Every structure is written in C-alpha cells, then in structure tokens.
Image: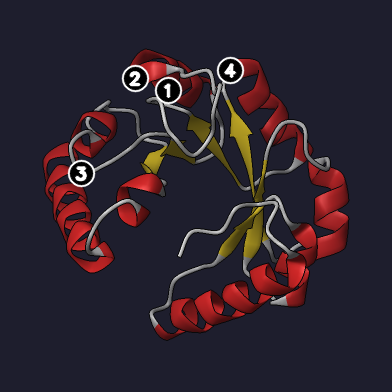
Amino acid sequence: MSLEKDAKTGKFLEAAKACHNICRLHGVHLLINDRIDVALACDADGVHIGQSDMPVAVVRTLLGPEKIIGVSCKTPEQAQQAWVDGADYIGCGGVYPTNTKVNNLTVGLEGLKTVCLASKLPVVAIGGISVSNARSVMELGVPNLKGVAVVSAMFDTESILVETQKLHAVLMETRAVVK
C-alpha cells in the first residue's frame, strides 16, 4: 500500500502503526516521510524531511536525540547544511525521474556522486531507483553512499515480495563487489 504524504492523518497513522509492527519484527527502522506528528504518534524510529519542511533543529527538539532525522539534498551546500543542522543522514536525488514526485529536478549519477563527496553524513540515493538501475547507483565508489530508497519500483509491481527479493539480491551482489 502506498501512502501519499497528504493522506488523512487517521489512515496514515493506522498504516504507520502496522508498518512499525512489521519493521520491529524484522529489526528494521521505520522512518516517516515529512509527517513529524505521525512519527511521534506511532513511535517511529525517525523522519525524513525535505528542504521546505520543518527545520532539523525543531524536529530534533520534538523527536528527541535518539530518533533518526534524514534530510533530502540535491546540492553539496544542502548536504553540508544538513550536517551543520544535526541531521543523521541525507537522501540525495532524485537520481532518476520518478512518478512519486512530479516536476522533480533529477541530479543523475554525477550529481549524486558530487553530493556524496561533499557530505560528512551517510547518504541514501533516492528517486527512480529500481532493480534495473540500483547496481549503477551503488557502484559509484563513494564510501558514504550507504543504500537506496525505493518506492515506485516496489509498489508498481505485481509482487512486492518478488521485486524486493530481486532488489536485495542486486544490492548484496554490489556490496560484495564494491568492498
């Protein structure tokens, strides 16, 4: 089930709680996109915010020091500011065009690499990433690129499980090669 960030709060919270239970069973962190209220209400592990969302310092005050805060960044300057502001990681992209965000400027692989090299934080590549291009992303050769965020590739498929297994296999192969 794909949730839009402007979904009704009650439905969003219900889905977030269900996701959180599943994540806990598998030892996986749950981060809520943009919605600090929902993250607080379901005791999520953290949030991911954009450049036009609430400032990191305010989010940190609301969530506390133990929660994870990620910030979307497209430029080296934004990546440096996220570190200064106290973010825990950055999401860089969209690397590729995506249907998840319309009119979203893509940074491409070179833009991702440039931001990674400028960042003092771990980086997750975001935007248009799928089984077919995840290898190219992870083979950029920058040590702080820690993974990919995938939405459309999982939810726009017949079987989320099969697509997840394929992506996991690609990422594990890439991890073995890059080390």
Q: CA distance from mark 1 to mark 3?
A: 18 Å
The picture places residue 146, in percent across and down from the top left corner, at 38, 44
Point out which mark residue 76 bears: 4
Give the foreground label among 4 and 2: 2
Camera-side residue: 127 or 74? 127
What secondary structure is found at the residue carrying circle 2?
A: helix
Q: CA distance from mark 3 to mark 4?
A: 27 Å
Place residue 168 in its image quadrant: bottom left
The picture places residue 57, in percent across and down from the top left corner, at 85, 45
Task: Say whether residue 20 is visible.
Answer: yes
Task: Identify residue for label 2.
Answer: 109
Q: CA distance from mark 4 to mark 1?
A: 9 Å
Label whose residue precedes the other's in the sequence (3 or 4): 4
Task: Identify residue for label 1.
Answer: 112
Task: Identify residue for label 3.
Answer: 131
Q: Is residue 69 above or below residue 111?
A: below
